[in-house]
Image (spheres, coloured by chain):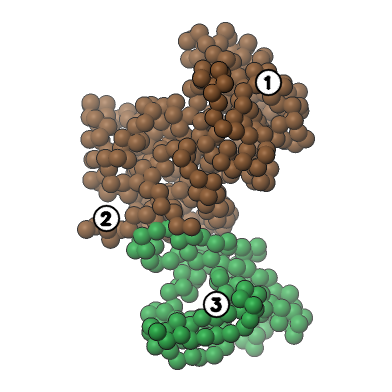
Amino acid sequence: MTWRRRHVLATDDWSADEIEQVLETTERMREVLSRPIRRAPPLRGRTVILFFAEASTRTRVSFELAAKALSADVVNVSASGSSVEKGETLLDTVRTLEALGGDVVVMRHSASGAPYFVAQRSGAAVINAGDGWHAHPTQGLLDAFTLRGALGDLAGKRIVIVGDVVHSRVARSDIHALVPLGARITLCGPPTLQPSAWLHGALPDGVGFEPDLDRALRGADAVIALRLQRERQEGGLIPSLREYARVWGLTEARVALMRDGAPVMHPGPMNEGVEIDAAVAHGARSLIETQVTNGVAVRMALLYLLAGTTSLEAAAT
Amino acid sequence: MERDRDLSALAVIGIRSRGDVLAARLRDALRANEGVDVPLGLLDITLYRDDLTRVGYAPEIHETRIPFSVDDRVVVLVDDVLYTGRTIRAALDALVDFGRPKAIRLAVLVDRGHRELPIRADFVGKNVPTQPGDDVRVRLTEIDGRDEVEVVRP
């Protein structure tokens, strides 16, 4: 199958075949990363611009390592210290980045939909590295890749996602990467932190909601804990962090309710002792470090596939 | 084998997608005739192609598996058809990312001429004179159900 997509904005309209192609390419990239020299040349002469208008360390570093492992030139732009602070519009910033020769723009932005705006108006390929509450497609794909490595075929597997679903672009992108592969999702967490339409039954295909964490975990094939943002408490959505940890935190006793050896994941950064206990985060079931390693390989796969859709000769004329 | 007496340092690596089958046959022949088990690898050169920025799409990457260190080994690189030499150039670049072999030799089933790079094979099954527009199709039992080389002239 020839890759046709020009951008990676969200995977909500991707076919299972497209997701499959990314995961297979990721497998090849993992092999590249296992070599004595962890670098291959397919993006030589290409420039990847990392435009992060919102704080991020792990995702930015992961993209930077991925782009460099494919021999691209990498330019970092953050909102603070750039002309964004001087009042430049998003569009002008992107036009400038493009004029500087960016073939691929990887962007994170606090506004949901910002990467769509840029993709429609710029010649560069755009990868969404997280936009507001909307989507974080590379996280969804790396979670799918990691789960498949641990569980094999995901058809019929039941994955629990617990925590602050309504504000979570990770939860949405996990659903949009896992459901097409045949997995079923059980959402769990405080009702104040779930999308209200979903609470009232209008759930997407393949997704269910279970208000009791023990019941959600019983017999599950894996669990993904979401990060709890501390400002949720200040906003009155949860009574206290201690209360949250007691009711919704992943403890050793709770994860033991899952199928034998069922893995535990977290997109990071973790609040240990809140949504996940340290013993679970660093225990035998934890795939959290594997997620980080796989993240680089997934981003390499996407950069490779997208760069292929733009020919250097066409760009030069 | 005459040149590389120490067969224990030998390794065979086939270039996808027909060279890997030929490499496996070479490994089997070495086991049957010399009683040595040489490590077998397979190499996909897609990421090293020199035309990636021109083709306008991302070619599918196939599996590479080299489950041993190439350091200080004599690596016999195996491919079905030697033509422009660009595939071999890519394979050489890929191999050095795996380490520093003592030497790299090239074995091909068919050399059809028309090199575009200064590359030649050490072991050639058959030299087949062709014209640049010809299509040389190698079929192997393991993949195609029969062993056959066909030169198609348009």
Identify which amino acid the numbered label 1 is placed on: Leu
At label 2, counting other C-alpha atoms closer than 10 Å, the crowd grade (few under 14, some 14-19, many 20 or more) is few
Instruction: Kindly tell me whether residue A221 is visible in this rendering.
Output: yes
Q: Position of residue A63 (x, y in %)?
A: 45, 43
Asked if disc 2 and disc 3 are in contact, CB closer than 8 Å, the reply is no
- Residue bearing mark 1: A213
**Left or right: residue A72 compared with residue A189:** left
Q: Chain of mark 2?
A: A
At label 1, counting other C-alpha atoms closer than 10 Å, the crowd grade (few under 14, some 14-19, many 20 or more) is many
Identify which amino acid the numbered label 2 is placed on: Ala
- Say which of marks 3 and 1 sits in front: 1
Q: Is residue B150 above or below residue A294?
A: below
Q: Which chain is brown?
A: A
Q: Chain of mark 3?
A: B
Task: Classify the position of the C terminus of chain B by image quarter.
Answer: bottom left
Q: Which chain is green?
A: B
- Residue bearing mark 2: A315
SS type, badge 3: strand
The CA span between labels 2 and 3 is 34 Å
Instruction: Kindly tell me whether residue A55 is visible in this rendering.
Output: no
SS type, badge 2: helix
Task: Classify the position of the N terminus of chain B by image quarter.
Answer: bottom right
**Left or right: residue B135 compared with residue B13:** left
Identify which amino acid the numbered label 3 is placed on: Asp
Q: Chain of mark 1?
A: A
Q: Position of residue B149 (x, y in %)?
A: 55, 85
State the residue at coordinates (50%, 14%). A232
State the residue at coordinates (49%, 60%). B60
Could you say which disc has been placed on residue B79 in the image? Answer: 3
